[in-house]
Image (spheres, rainbow, N blue to C red):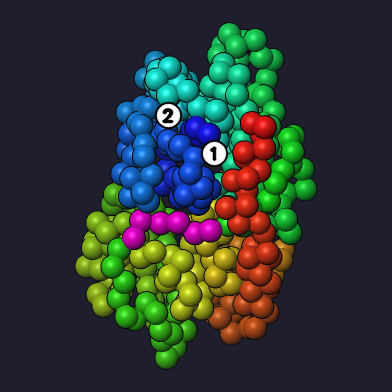
Amino acid sequence: MKILFVTGGSPATVFALAPLASAASLAGHDVLVASPEDMAPYVTGIGLPVLPVTNGTMHRFMLEDRAGASLSIPADPQERIHFNGEGFGRLAAATLPRLRSLAADWAPDLVVGGSLCYAAPLLAHELGVPWVRHTWDLGEPPGMDNGAATELATELEAAGLDGLPVPALWVDICPPGLRAAHLAPGPRHSMRFVPANLRRPLEPWMLRRAGRPRVCVTAGSRVSGADGVAELVELARTVEGLDGELVVAAPQDVADALAVEVPGVRAGWFALDTLLATCDLIVHHGGGQTAMTALHAGVPQLLVPTIPKMLEPCRRIEERGAAVVLAEGEQSGARIARAATELLTGPGPRERAAEIGAEIAAQPSPHRVVSVLQSLRA
């Protein structure tokens, strides 16, 4: 079977789809990944073939309309979610021409798209093949779909659709106990979350626990520029005051700049699944793949979300007792330090995180889910 996987515009969207795409390839299926050009190195870096379908960046699709005019980010959180959905709609519209050309040369039997990859259902509809919607993390707010449908109104009408199609199947990597109360329509099949990342050579210290609590700080794989470095420096200095060992996971250029500002800190591009096995706490921005990797490792989390859509999934982890969430306005240095101390000293958060880790481990493996994909073409 020929399976086309469609990613979004950030490394996390590549890593989320990697386990199922790799399992399908190892099972003997013909797998191809379509992604924005700047994501292609991440796809090849995890050993999968890729065809770039746009040279536009996610930053551009979010902050410019189709004519290239600048857009302002709404202050209202709900409007921001709709706005973000429109940005993903523009990404979809930009990728459709090359996706159609790809399909003319390499006709897929099945299309698997990430949660917000709206070109996937449109292409699958045109080709008359099943579409599978693959979650990236703990789930996306419904307002994202509404925003995308608004942006893609012309494309949907041309396809004879009055809204976004319902997928033949959802592949859901969010553990059932953490899923939102109201889910988008379509049958669901759970799949075990498996961390994926670009690999670098390990160092011995990563494999052993420190003599004091080890705290990982990260702002994800997309952090960049002077503002990103400053944000991480402030967070690192706050956590550095705790009685523990600080490790900062960041793109290497950001890590190098941070090491100048915070001498002696261990900073670099570290594979989180390996690193978190010896950590006692992670402090991060609320990114879905980072949060899922921490849950997989059974590590408590101090979540300081920076984008409105991240807040609700973070709250679900907090409600399970595995995290503390500090929303905008609560993220002072003193409050972060106090919350980190509470998470490190109390046994409850680690026990709750371990329970969720066991729930993740009990889900069907990507290998088993490949057979479910095969049945869609039976």
Q: Amino acid at mark 2?
A: Phe
* First of labels 1, 2 by sequence position: 2
Q: Where residue 228 sits in the image (x, y, percent)?
A: 35, 53
Relative to 211, does residue 248 appear above or below in the rendering? above
Please tell me which residue is depicted at 28% across the width and 71% down the height of the picture: 262
Q: How far apart, in angstroms, are the residues tagged by discs 1 and 2?
A: 17 Å
Q: Report which quarter residue 34 is drawn in.
A: top left
Q: Residue 358 in the image: x percent, y percent? A: 66, 70
Which residues, given as a range, are shown in magenta?
194-199
For label 1, the SS is strand
Residue 195 lies in the magenta stretch: yes
Q: Is residue 15 visible?
A: yes
Residue count near mark 2 (Cα–Cα under 10 Å), binned few <14, some 14–19, many ≥20: many
> Which label is found at residue 114?
1
Hey, which quadrant is residue 135 in on the image?
Answer: top right
The residue lying at 67 percent from left, 37 percent from top is 375
321 to 100, vertically: above or below: below
Image location (x, y in percent) of residue 280: 51, 78
Give the overall secondary structure of the magenta segment: loop
Q: Is residue 230 left or right of residue 321?
A: left
Which of 189/16 is in front?
Answer: 189
In the image, residue 114 lies at what x, y percent? 54, 39
For residue 61, the mark is: 2
**Callout 1 amino acid:** Gly
